[in-house]
Amino acid sequence: MPISRRVPVLSFLLGMILADTPTTLRAGTSPVAITEGASQQDGTVSGTVRAADSGAPILLASVRIEPTNQGASTDADGRFTIYGVPEGAGTLVVSAVGYDSSRMPLTIGTDVVEIEIQLEVDPLGVDGLTVSAARSRVATKAETELLATPQAISLVPGAVIEQQAAVTLDDVIKNVSGLIQASSINGEYATFAARGFYSNSNGNFRRNGVQVSKFGELLDANTDRVEVLKGPATVLYGQLDPGGVINLRTKQPLGATGTEIRVAGGSFGRVDGRIDATGRLFGPLLYRVNAQIENRDSYRDEVFWRTRFISPVITWHAGPATTLTVETEFKREEGLLDEGLFAPAPTLASLDEQPVNRFLGEPDVPADRARSAVLARLEQGIGGSWSTRIATSWSKNERNANRVDLRSLGGDGRTLGRRTDFRQQELETLFWDAGLIGALQLGPTSHRVAVGLDGYSTTRLEERFRGPVDPIDIFLPRYTGAVAPSPFAVEDQSVDMLGLYAQDQIALGDAFVLQLGLRYTTFDQLTVDRDDGTEEDFSDQELTTSAGVVHRVTPDVSIYGSMSEAFAPTLSVDRNGDAFDPNFGRQFELGLKADLLDRRLSTTIALYHLRRTGMISFVYPPEGGFYRVQSGVQRSRGFEVDLLGRLTGSVSAIASYGFTDGAVLEDDVYETGHGLGGAPRHHGSLWLRRGLGNGLYAGAGVFFQSEWKAFTSYPDDRMLRGYHRFEAMAGYSLANGVRLQLNGRNLANKRYYLSGGEGRAVGLPASPRSFELSVSWGTGALRR
């Protein structure tokens, strides 16, 4: 299908099949800088990448020079610059989603080489998926080829998110090894486990590299792609759980005008409308706006959610080396929280005695949440190969988490005790990160350095109310309404963090890169109980390190080894009200990365051993309730494989497999060898898409997980069942920019559970078979 104008948003991560295409060279002006290492004896390559059919600049095209590891991505005007290119002959390789790739010979001197590249449209590649020297900032804070990083990184590009019609973040991470949905917060949003450990600190979630609060669903209409940095990452990102970092990259303004409108409708009353608009306001000022309205009921009786979202973005190219981007987000959600089913017998298998749709709460107890956020990024070239990057964000989350709490079953095996649990929460966070990134030559070694100072201040206010609710028959439920609850607890908590970090990538010849990192962090945590006026103030400081080495066996294959550390404060107290010490994690990892099939297929294989200390264990005394103790040492080790790219000219794939062996090593509550929650031994995925010609395409996939425990506190024989789930889609792209797509999920209608309640026989069943039909229409730069 011919496609007239395509401005990609994923091409520094993804490229097309390498093929010779015509290239034009001409003189030009000084470039906007995205810098790499330089010395006085090296040259500079800069230029512009445009669409051959329309002349429109291509955003985020991947530009690299073989046989070096140097490269850059184009800005909204299609501009790129690569500094510090050694003298001699090389090959310039340019790739972008939706275009044929370009390869051209190049001779580098000490002068600036200015080039204009024109890429031809690849009609098969617009909805396909390939990788050509994929790059990311998530592991180094500077765009770095994934083959040159000593840590596993998984990418889920926007093409896959659209193909699978993902609605929530757990719909996306099912494509990533080592990362699973570990539970559901009352059906409101998912929590995750990474490499065997719950990873739900705010520090584990980023938007464009900037910390965001995990206070609701994070996959919004402005999400462009998702990156997962696996394992501890405290050196660059501060306090977080050791499993990894989930970074959501958002859609950025383009230099050409475009609009896309998408409407979708599906099973269980879901209706979703979105608009995406971009262009140039005037001169150097670009804009992009994403907005969404979603109304959805549920496969669960009475449950619903209503979402309103808008995100305007402005980018100002103030000069050849200065870019300022300001993003705003406003989101409002209303719905009904849902704990799930209650097992009538001691085993979780007895959950199956109730239908999937049964709701045991009360319909007149709605919940709501709202989020406002502003994120600003300033990038300033300061000469040579050096630049500064300053990022700051402010967010405010307000949440009325009102629900009916399912308590205990009566002696008749069917009468369930309940109570209301209302929480009025407010979370306000200010985050900032100021960094200096550049390259220098020290004797025979080249250094790529990132140093910076970051910090955040967050304040959480919470008021809790509890009240009685009539019991309910779990087999024949009748709703009676909730009684207005009474105040139960009032708590304020503030956390302040300040960190200084440094990382150095040292090139030892052409084949080896040594990466060293160091971070000093100080934090203060203050908890105030407004009921009795007591305060608990806890402060600490930590020095964390990382080290890794990469051996570039060939230009397309590397092997690596690394050690990394993480720490996070434990934002809870013991039964005496005293704060716990932070927990600490250390990981050793070995891996292999390869770009196969002429760099169309990116592959990562990793082995890891992760040990975590200072873990919190739950104790459930006979008289009821629970309390926490800190005594645990836990270990997770495993094997992971991730594949992403194009198998043939018309077939793309994303696949993963993870083996996880998690166990308690030391604990005052659990026996040695006790299994970890959120750590199934096996899980994986395979998703294939094929272009059928004449605008038709289809895809299918399987997602599987072995039996698992929702929480470490569960006994090892209290497992949620594993599953194999099948999905499929088919679509048709018309020449006028209209696209139709039908998605089907859980096609075999398997019954399985998303979570199991802590300490109780509660399970939230997953959705049965469902379908969704979407219609989209794109114009200009967003035409597909």
Image: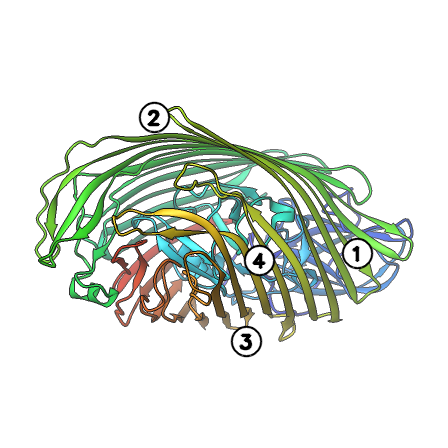
Q: Residue at x 59, y 66 (%)?
A: 608
Residue marked by disc 2: 531
Mark 2 is surrounded, within 10 Å at the Cα level, by few (under 14), some (14 to 19) or many (20 or more) other residues, namely few
Contact flag, marks 3 and 2 (Cβ < 8 Å): no
Q: CA distance from mark 3 to mark 2?
A: 65 Å
Residue 358, compared with residue 532, is above or below; it is below
Q: CA distance from mark 1 to mark 4?
A: 22 Å
Looking at numbered disc 1 in the image, what kind of residue is underneath it? Ile
Q: Earlier in the sequence, mark 1 or mark 3?
A: 1
Q: Nearer the viewer, mark 3 or mark 2?
A: 2
Residue 230, compared with residue 390, is above or below; it is below
Q: Earlier in the sequence, mark 1 or mark 4?
A: 4
Residue marked by disc 3: 648
Residue marked by disc 4: 231
Looking at numbered disc 3 in the image, what kind of residue is underneath it? Thr
Q: Position of residue 217 (x, y in %)?
A: 39, 46
Mark 1 is surrounded, within 10 Å at the Cα level, by few (under 14), some (14 to 19) or many (20 or more) other residues, namely many
**Which residue occupies the foreground of this view, 297 or 679?**
679
Q: Earlier in the sequence, mark 3 or mark 4?
A: 4
Residue 220, compared with residue 722, is above or below; it is above
Q: Nearer the viewer, mark 4 or mark 2?
A: 2
Q: Nearer the viewer, mark 2 or mark 1?
A: 2
**Which residue occupies the foreground of this view, 779 or 428?**
428
Mark 4 is surrounded, within 10 Å at the Cα level, by few (under 14), some (14 to 19) or many (20 or more) other residues, namely many
